[in-house]
Image (cartoon, rainbow, N blue to C red):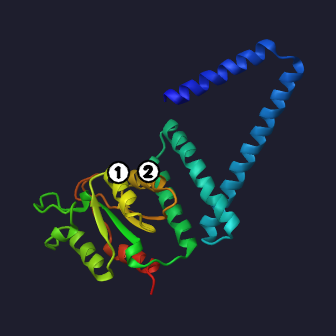
């Protein structure tokens, strides 16, 4: 915030000096530059929006269109989030679209990975709240009692030899990703955590699965294990 404030003050000082000491020709040049920048930015957002709509409808596209769609999504999402806050719209719906479209972009890559290159990332709220066994250090501490989906996911991890990590928050998730450096992540979380996580990992593709929250956020959440298993089967090398 301090850096942004300094930037804006510097810009205001620069405009003040230009206003005080410039000629009419300088004003015209500045106005022309601002008009050109406005046209370029408007054109970019228009092209990006069209690319996003095209990919979302067709589910497939050429590399150039996908590039514009991916880059446009990163640029448009913060703007749309701010606008939804101003107009008190449903932010979760926007974030869900972001996650769904990100998954679509990952699908268009059509890449396969070995099990060791894949990481399953789970929130601790999937665990039954009254369970006495700590699984954040090792999911194999789960006793498979069936009260939550952790046991089923642990079985899938054992079957397919894919490492799985249960984290308590975004910082823990970032630390594990930074340490393990997987080639792709299959992550379960709420809309907010998935959108921030997808942005945080940068170049690592993420398949996001939004958890069910029948008891409210961060408490005894759930995920369709069959959907998770299918997502894994789609990216594992034969």
> Outermost residue toward the bottom?
238
Q: How many marks?
A: 2
First in sequence, mark 1 or 2: give its number: 1
In the image, what residue occupies the spot 34% across and 49% down? 171
Under tag 1, what secondary structure?
helix
Image quarter in which the C terminus is found: bottom left
Q: Is residue 10 left or right of residue 211?
A: right
* Residue 62 vs residue 146, the one in the foreground: 62
Q: Is residue 78 left or right of residue 66?
A: left
What percent of the width, then of the height, locates residue 177? Answer: 38, 59
* Residue 206 vs residue 231, the one in the foreground: 206
Q: Is 153 above or below relative to 95? A: below
Under tag 2, what secondary structure?
helix
Q: Is residue 91 left or right of residue 47?
A: left
Residue 98 in view, yes or no: yes
What percent of the width, then of the height, locates residue 208? Answer: 43, 63
Please name the residue that numbered disc 2 is placed on: 196
Q: Is residue 96 left or right of residue 173?
A: right
* Residue 108 vs residue 159, the one in the foreground: 159
Q: Is 198 above or below relative to 155? A: above
**Quadrant of res 178:** bottom left
Residues at marks 1 and 2 touching, judged by CB atoms closer than 8 Å: yes
* Residue 175 vs residue 230, the one in the foreground: 175
Please name the residue that numbered disc 1 is placed on: 170
In the image, what residue occupies the spot 34% across and 58% down? 176
In the image, what residue occupies the spot 65% across and 61% down? 67
> Outermost residue toward the top?
20
């Amino acid at each position: 915030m301090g850096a942004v404030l300094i930037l804006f003050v510097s810009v205001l000082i620069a405009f003040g000096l230009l206003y005080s000491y410039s000629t009419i020709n300088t004003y015209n040049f500045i106005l022309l530059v601002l008009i050109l920048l406005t046209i370029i930015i408007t054109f970019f957002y228009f092209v990006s929006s069209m690319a996003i709509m095209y990919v979302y409808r067709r589910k497939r596209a050429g590399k150039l269109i996908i590039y514009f769609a991916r880059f446009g999504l990163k640029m448009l999402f913060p703007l749309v989030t701010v606008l939804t806050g101003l107009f008190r719209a449903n932010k979760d719906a926007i974030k869900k679209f972001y996650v769904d479209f990100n998954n679509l972009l990952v699908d268009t890559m059509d890449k396969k990975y070995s099990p060791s290159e894949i990481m399953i990332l789970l929130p601790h709220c999937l665990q039954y709240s009254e369970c006495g066994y700590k699984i954040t250090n090792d999911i194999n501490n789960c006793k498979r009692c069936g009260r939550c989906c952790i046991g089923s996911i642990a079985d899938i991890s054992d079957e397919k030899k894919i490492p799985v990590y249960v984290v308590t928050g975004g910082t823990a998730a970032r630390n594990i990703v930074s340490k393990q450096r997987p080639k792709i992540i299959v992550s379960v979380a709420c809309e907010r955590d998935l959108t921030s996580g997808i942005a945080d990992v940068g170049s690592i593709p993420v398949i996001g699965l939004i958890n069910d929250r029948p008891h409210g956020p961060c408490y005894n959440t759930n995920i369709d294990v069959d959907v998770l298993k299918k997502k894994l089967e789609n990216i594992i090398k034969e």
